[in-house]
Image: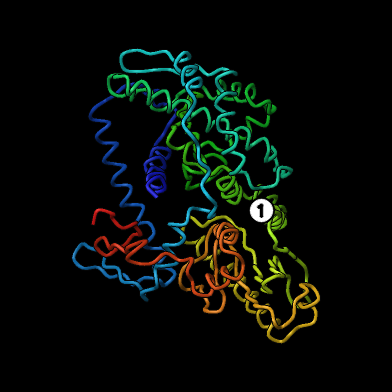
Amino acid sequence: MVADTLMNSLTHPLRACLRKWTENNPPARRAYVSDAYGYAWQWLKDAEHYDQFCTIFPLWHRKRLILSVEDRRLSIEPVRHDDKTYEAYNRLVRKEGRADPVLGDPPAALLNLLRNRTKRRETWFRLKFDREVVSRLVEFHRATIARRSTLPDDWRFLNFSLKEYRAAMTTLQCMMHGWYLVRTMVANGGMKGLGYPSSVWLLEKDDLANQLADYTRVPRHSIDAILDLVTFGSNGILNPDIATQPLVGLGRGQVALAPFVFLNLNVERNLCTLLNQIKEERDHYSSLVDMKEDALIGEIRQFLADTEFEVIAGKLQSTDLDCAIIDRTNRCCLCLELKWFIEPAEIREIGDRTKDLKKGVTQAKALNDLFKRDDQRLRELLGIDPTYDFLSAVGSVNWIGMADVQAPSVPIVKVWHLMGELKEKGLAAIMSWLRQRDYLPKPGTDFNVVWSADWYGIMAPDPER
């Protein structure tokens, strides 16, 4: 949550810099300037407030807020006081609800290699990347990267494949972790100013492309297309986001890479978001979307392969049945209407994704009705009868919506949160867990709603209180 806040805030100053930038700007200075640092820090803190301010007017436009002006202050009143529990779930159950990949401490041999490749001076350092350093960093991250890669390897976009993009971007993430580790070591070693002049890696874009082509074996033309796509403000993006375009161009062929930014990226999610903002890419990407559901069902089958549960998908006369999980021993059946979309990051996307979830709720209700009517097609497809305990729910990969999309008879839960609990609790207990909404965080225990002036945020309770 802290990283999200900082990333969202950082976008606003960068947009301002991009709009005011000209070819005549002087080169970036690799030095600590006390006044400039203070101004930049204040600008970033103000940007946090501005980012909240930017959410007000889309909500007002969609009639979710009532605004009035009192003196020079905006007074904000919700149209209705929604239950914030579902919003808290979206924030507190990490992203896709999977168990977080755990990256252990780097081995001593890797740290020694990084030290040997680092040039130091009184206030700055440089890490000299080469094939050995990068391959060792990539190997250290390999298991973690694999667990975060969920989209089909054979997807191909207009100028590169998903496999090529993943190789280039995850290699950059590994290199930036190496840079971060070196800065931590030199700062702990007493370097003056904590190595601030080297906190961001500056180099020629052509040099970066050459290095990536060498380390990844991805063709240079694909590397060039990838770096162009992820350069902040490129490809006609009017309001660029540092999360989707993390490479910052500084003019004269120079680029900047910030370890904090690259280490907090979801490579695949951000690629999908970016492609949807570029018309030519969006049209091509839309043709791949249907493949995501098939891939998700395949992942679920693989995840449950070592259990007693059956996983069935099929078509009915009135609707598709995305995924049914059946426990024959305990005679229970959970049907999931699957939703795999890009996690919404702003108000317009929230509105669109809410419509998708509403459609899923309607389809889940239709399955519940078919079971109540003892529909023959449903019974034959699943091999069940009216004595089974039956529940239909919506399984979303990364977002379950707000209170306004919830229905008493149809739970909405993150798929991988559900899968993790299913293996521990069993299907019969999980169906009760869903019906009772026990998957949701409890207000006052797991989260508090904290109002700041007329605005609010979700935060974990202070364990000291």
Residue 250 occupies quadrant = top left
| In front of the other: 434 or 135 | 434
**What residue lies at 42% left-to-right and 40% top-to-bottom?**
19
| In front of the other: 60 or 343 | 343
- Taking the image as drawn, is residue 289 in sight? no
Q: From the viewer's perspective, is 271 left or right of 103? A: right
Q: How is the image coloured?
A: rainbow
Q: From the viewer's perspective, is 277 left or right of 300? A: left
Q: How would you rate the neighbour count of disc 1 (Cα within 10 Å): few for under 14, some for 14-19, many for 20 or more?
A: some
Q: From the viewer's perspective, is 381 left or right of 255? A: right
Residue placed under numbered mark 1 in the picture? 303
Up/down of 165 relative to 91, above or below: above
Which quarter shows the C terminus? Answer: bottom left
| In front of the other: 235 or 97 | 97
Residue 99 coordinates in the image, percent (x, y): 53, 50
Residue 377 coordinates in the image, percent (x, y): 80, 78
Up/down of 64 relative to 275, above or below: below
Tell me the SS state at disc 1: helix
| In front of the other: 218 or 278 | 218
Up/down of 398 relative to 258, above or below: below
Residue 233 coordinates in the image, percent (x, y): 50, 40
Q: Which residue is at the far left?
A: 71
- Taking the image as drawn, is residue 421 in sight? yes
**What residue lies at 73% left-to-right and 64% top-to-bottom?**
310
**What residue lies at 53% left-to-right and 30% top-to-bottom?**
174
* Residue kind at label 1, given as amino acid type: Phe
